């Protein structure tokens, strides 16, 4: 044990000595959370140059709600300002300025993933399934990169698909939920790690309805909102009945019914369908029904259920399909439009609506005093959603991002 601790200490020192190199590329690969966390934390020493006051003139502004006529937006340090004094000026004619995009479902593990997200205009993300608090927190609070929020480890039953994944990661067995009476222990254990949200998994075989119900009620009692994985119709029924706050993914077997959509609406639940990965899984295995996912999203949207943009971006070995970081959110917007959302509704799903429903009070809209998380694109995405890919500049908390859209 002493030898291992000395080894990890040496590795962390090595990472710190190479911090600026690590900020530009992934230097060393490892499956050990302690080593990955050391690498991620070492990059904090390589801080981008200080922000400058910049006035973007004559730019169309999608403020998170609607498109406004050309005007001037001022970046003053980490915030949006209305004072042009001493600002440099940039002509934004023919360009559109949007709030930085919010990906509501990601699985980054290292700084390279954060860089890929940021340079594609994704400035906020919600990181799902934190098996290692040490590794997840090492991805937070990096100057000039995406701002990451995190969930708990996923609550799953022994012998289930996700339970088997958990067992591979955690040999102690403490991250699994064994029965309804054990749910209280699991929630308390996770909340001690202070996640922003709790994540649970509905699947068959998996947690029973009573176990899911208790996990949700106990999480709510301790002040945590609950996100639920549900990728088939029966899991949607379970998630809706358990009164989770958000249901993530969309059914890949059969579409949800009108009655179920009404239940989800009545209970005030939010859906993040992650069509990017549902499509990727269907392409990898034609037995899955992507049309069921699209039809479900279309129905939910027509019923008035809030829809958020999330991708399930993940490059971990062993998952059913890879979804790249950054570019996939632009695909997600396009897929949401194909499912029936308007261009403006899709943009809201990744900006103002996402910020409101995740309770992010300082972002998601372009307004004085808000975080200077901004995306500047060629064209008008309210007319052609694909224009979000035409990236000219990105700012993360006021810091201009290099290597954009690459």
Image (tube, rainbow, N blue to C red):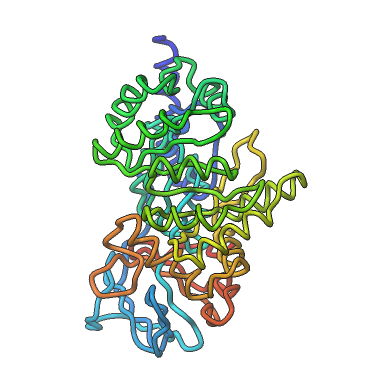
Q: Please indicate, yes or no, whether residue 304 appears anywhere in the rendered image.
A: yes
79 displayed left or right of 306: left
Nearest the eye: 173 or 207 = 207
Identified at 52% across, 47% down, the residue is 112
Q: Please indicate, yes or no, whether residue 41 appears anywhere in the rendered image.
A: no
In the rendered image, which quarter is residue 11 located in? top left
Give how far across and how far down residue 304 sits, in percent.
45, 66
Identified at 44% across, 53% down, the residue is 263
Give how far across and how far down residue 15 sits, in percent.
44, 34
Nearest the eye: 104 or 285 = 285
Nearest the eye: 152 or 300 = 300
The answer to whether 83 is drawn above or below residue 208 in the figure is below
Give how far across and how far down residue 242 sits, in percent.
40, 40
Nearest the eye: 43 or 300 = 300
Q: In which quarter of the image is the C terminus?
A: bottom right
In the rendered image, which quarter is residue 231 located in? top right
Identified at 62% across, 59% down, the residue is 294
Q: Residue furthest right?
A: 286
Q: Which residue lies furthest to the front in this view?
A: 259
The answer to whether 255 is drawn above or below residue 320 in the figure is below
How many discs appear?
Answer: 0
Q: In which quarter of the image is the N terminus?
A: top left
Give how far across and how far down residue 128 sits, in percent.
45, 42
């Amino acid at each position: 044990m002493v030898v291992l601790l000395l080894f990890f200490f040496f590795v962390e020192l090595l990472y710190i000595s190479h911090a600026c190199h690590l900020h530009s590329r992934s230097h060393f690969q490892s499956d050990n959370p302690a080593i990955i966390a050391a690498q991620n934390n070492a990059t904090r020493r390589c801080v981008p140059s200080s922000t400058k006051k910049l006035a973007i003139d004559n730019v169309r502004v999608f403020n998170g709600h609607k498109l406004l006529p050309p005007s001037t937006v001022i970046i003053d340090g980490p915030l949006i300002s209305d004072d042009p004094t001493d600002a440099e000026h940039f002509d934004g004619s023919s360009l559109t300025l949007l709030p930085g995009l919010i990906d509501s479902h990601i699985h980054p593990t290292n700084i390279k993933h954060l860089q890929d997200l940021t340079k594609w205009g994704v400035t906020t993300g919600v990181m799902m399934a934190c098996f290692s608090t040490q590794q997840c927190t090492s991805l937070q609070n990096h100057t000039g990169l995406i701002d990451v929020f995190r969930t708990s480890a996923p609550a799953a039953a022994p012998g289930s698909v996700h339970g088997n994944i958990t067992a591979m990661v955690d040999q102690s067995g403490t991250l699994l939920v064994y029965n309804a009476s054990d749910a209280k222990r699991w929630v308390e254990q996770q909340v001690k790690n202070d996640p922003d949200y709790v994540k649970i998994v509905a699947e068959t075989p998996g947690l029973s309805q009573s176990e899911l119900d208790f996990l949700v009620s106990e999480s709510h009692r301790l002040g945590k909102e609950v996100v639920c994985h549900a990728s088939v119709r029966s899991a949607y029924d379970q998630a809706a009945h358990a009164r989770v706050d958000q249901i993530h993914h969309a059914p890949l077997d059969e579409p949800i019914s009108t009655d179920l959509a009404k239940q989800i609406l009545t209970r005030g639940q939010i859906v993040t369908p992650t069509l990017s990965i549902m499509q990727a899984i269907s392409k990898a295995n034609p037995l899955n029904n992507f049309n069921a996912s699209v039809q479900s999203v279309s129905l939910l949207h027509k019923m008035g259920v809030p829809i958020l943009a999330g991708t399930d971006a993940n490059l971990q070995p062993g998952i059913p399909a890879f979804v790249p970081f950054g570019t996939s959110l632009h695909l997600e917007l396009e897929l949401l439009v194909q499912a029936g959302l308007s261009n403006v509704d899709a943009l809201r799903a990744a900006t103002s609506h996402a910020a409101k429903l995740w309770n992010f009070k300082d972002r998601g809209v372009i307004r004085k005093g808000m975080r200077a998380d901004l995306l500047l694109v060629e064209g008008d995405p309210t007319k052609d959603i694909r224009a979000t890919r035409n990236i000219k500049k990105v700012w993360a908390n006021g810091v201009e991002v290099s290597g954009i859209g690459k």
